[in-house]
Amino acid sequence: MNNFDFNIYELGDVKLLSGETLLSAELAYKTYGTLNSKKNNVVVLPTFYTGTHIRNEGFFGTNRAINPNKHFIISINLFGNGLSSSPTNSEKQQGSKFPSITLYDNVACQHKLIKDHLNINQIALVTGWSMAGCQSYQWAAQYPDMVDAILPFCASAKTSKHNFVFLEGVKAALCADPTWNNGDYNSSPIKGLKAFGRVYAGWAFSQSFFREKKYKELGFNNVEELLTDWENDHVNNWDANNLLTKLATWQKGDISLGPIYNGNFVEALKNIKAKAILMPCSTDLYFPPEDNKMEAEHMPNAELRTYTSIWGHCVANPGNDKKFENYLDQAISDLLE
């Protein structure tokens, strides 16, 4: 992974929900814009599964609803993404020694960054795509008095069993490579990473996306070119243990996990005070609209706005669908007004 311009917040040793300890924990983050005198213009953007703060820059701009000229944007990297503490950069817990981390742990540490380090007590909006959206739910449930609004898109408050099984599939494809060696590898498990990318690609878009050959709009002449691109992206940009760390975090996604709600998912949803717009894509295979519909029924201030598209989960990838970008920005504007 390339080195980017970002800040590091040193957390020290962090006790995790699992009972393990993340030693010398670090959060990588970057801010954009200026905090106003009332400190009420804060927008938090966590990162998604294969994202960094750089990829998050596709969700804001001077001509977008989230605007660095108006908002103080805090983009925070997920543990395991290679910038925040990860199997690849931990000095004391490298590779297979890296502990199990939940979204609860991630958000607890993000809270320390924002409240203790940046001296911010209120957040106007937490939003994001996919795992970043899952973190927006987590923020609203874990710190209900601190978050004014959330907008998770192509995400859910709890990883469904179907989503869990998909993740088992890509994990098995990667771990079947003998080079992986239970996480103690001397060279990258390239065959496993390629298999991971191929399986992942089949779920990232809908059936109709392939049927109607929408991949040509991404510059691919055929399906094999798309699959090869997904292979290369995972081989060239991602470490296997980092991917598996975040995958395990995703699989354990559940806003009721931990001491606040003790597994009572409905109670966790009911305690979300933030105004919320839940934005699934009609053909998302990871996070189908049915999950968000159920969530909205239990959240006191939630609205369901489903975006209809055959692009599936990747409709939200910046640059894929301008109409989605406009739809998203309208919803963000509605929440921030």
Image (cartoon, rainbow, N blue to C red):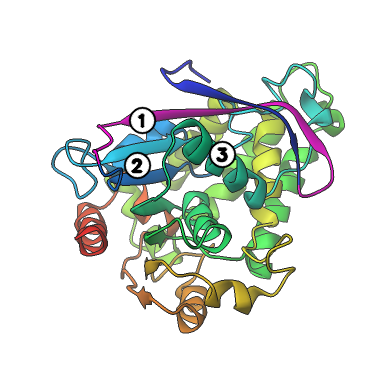
Judged from the image, the secondary structure of the residue bearing numbered disc 2 is: loop
Which residue is drawn at the image coordinates 69% and 69% (left, top)?
Answer: 261
Q: Are marks 3 and 1 in contact (CB under 8 Å)?
A: no
| Region in magenta | 17-37
The CA distance from mark 3 to mark 1 is: 15 Å
**Type of the residue with mark 3:** Lys
Judged from the image, the secondary structure of the residue bearing numbered disc 3 is: helix
Residue underneath mark 2: 221
Q: Is residue 146 left or right of residue 335?
A: right
Which residue is drawn at the image coordinates 49% and 40% (left, top)?
Answer: 115
Reply above or below: 301 against 43.
Answer: below
Residue 110 appears in which quarter of the rendering? top right
- Residue 229's spot in the image, x, y percent? 47, 34
Judged from the image, the secondary structure of the residue bearing numbered disc 1 is: strand
**Type of the residue with mark 2:** Asn
Q: Nearer the viewer, residue 55 or 208?
A: 55
Residue underneath mark 1: 31
Residue underneath mark 3: 112
Reply above or below: 261 against 216.
Answer: below
- Residue 336's spot in the image, x, y percent? 24, 58
